[in-house]
Amino acid sequence: EAQVTQNPRYLITVTGKKLTVTCSQNMNHEYMSWYRQDPGLGLRQIYYSMNVEVTDKGDVPEGYKVSRKEKRNFPLILESPSPNQTSLYFCASSPGTTGNQPQHFGDGTRLSIL
Amino acid sequence: AQTVTQSQPEMSVQEAETVTLSCTYDTSESNYYLFWYKQPPSRQMILVIRQEAYKQQNATENRFSVNFQKAAKSFSLKISDSQLGDTAMYFCAFMKHWGNAGNMLTFGGGTRLMVKP
C-alpha cells in the first residue's frame, strides 16, 4: 500500500530535550516536505526536499532541522524543543512539483512540549 | 507571495442539505492550481477536489463541486446532499503551476464543518 508513515503519532516531552519525528514514504517520491498545523493558521511549510541531499527552508524553519540521506526518509529534528513548537506536524511527499502531482500526507504527529 | 483566506471559521449544515465554503486568494501568478482538502477527526489530509487555473470549467467530484472565479480570485466549495461523514475541517490551498520554489502549498486557515442529523 502506498503511504507516508510518520512516527510517533503522539509525543509529550519537556523543553530542551532533543527529539526526532521520522517520516518514510514507499512511493519513490522525489519531493518531501514538513508542515505544522496550528489553529486558525492552516498548515505552514517548515522544510522541504527536492531530492536526496537537497533541502531548503519553508515559511517557518526556525528551531527545526531536517536531513535527506535516503530518498524514502525525511526526519524532522527538534534540537532544543520549546513550548511554541507544540503543534500538529505533517509530512508529505509527491513525485514532483507540479499541480497534477498532488501531495500524499502522513497521518500527523501531535507534539506537546511542556 | 501567495495568501489564502477562509473567512468562515465554522459552519454547520443539516444532513442532506447543501453548503458552500468560501475561499479567496491573492497571487500575481497567472497559472496555478487550487485545492480543497478535508481533514476528518482522524487527522488525515484527504484531497477532495483540484482546479487548474487555466481551465474555465469548474471541477466536480461526485457531491463536491467548486465555483472558480479567477478574476475575483475566489474558489468556493459546494457540498451537495451533505452526509454525516462530511463533518471535518476543510482547507483551501494554492499552488503555483511550477512549484520549483519552496512553498508548494499555501493553505488557508480552515473551516470547521459540522453536519447535523
Image: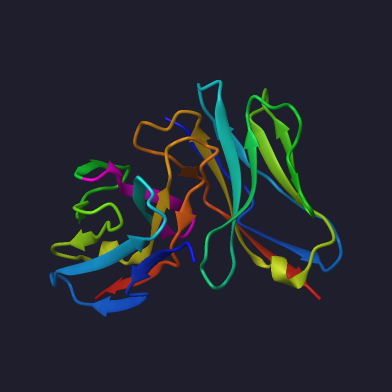
> Which quadrant of the figure contains the N terminus of chain B?
top left
> Which quadrant of the figure contains the C terminus of chain B?
bottom right
Give the colouring mode of the picture.
rainbow
- The structure residue drawn at horizontal position 68% and vertical position 45%, both measured from the top left corner, is B22
Is residue B65 visible from the viewing direction of this image?
A: no
Q: How many marks?
A: 0
Queried whether the magenta region covers residue A38, the answer comes back as yes
Q: Position of residue A70 (x, y in %)?
A: 23, 54
The answer to whether residue A34 is above or below residue B32 is: below
User: Could you tell whether B4 is left or right of A87 in the image?
Assistant: right
Q: Position of residue B107 (x, y in %)?
A: 49, 46
Is residue A53 visible from the viewing direction of this image?
A: yes
**Magenta highlight: main SS:** strand
- The structure residue drawn at horizontal position 14% and vertical position 64%, both measured from the top left corner, is A80
The magenta segment? A37-52
The answer to whether residue A28 is above or below residue A56 is: below
The answer to whether residue B116 is above or below residue B68 is: below
- The structure residue drawn at horizontal position 23% and vertical position 77%, both measured from the top left corner, is A13
User: Could you tell whether B55 is left or right of A95 in the image?
Assistant: right
User: Could you tell whether B13 is left or right of A36 in the image?
Assistant: right
Q: Position of residue A9 (x, y in %)?
A: 37, 75
Q: Position of residue A89 (x, y in %)?
A: 37, 62
The answer to whether residue B54 is above or below residue A47 is: above
Frontmost residue, B37 versus B98: B98
- The structure residue drawn at horizontal position 30% and vertical position 77%, both measured from the top left corner, is A11
Frontmost residue, B29 versus A83: B29
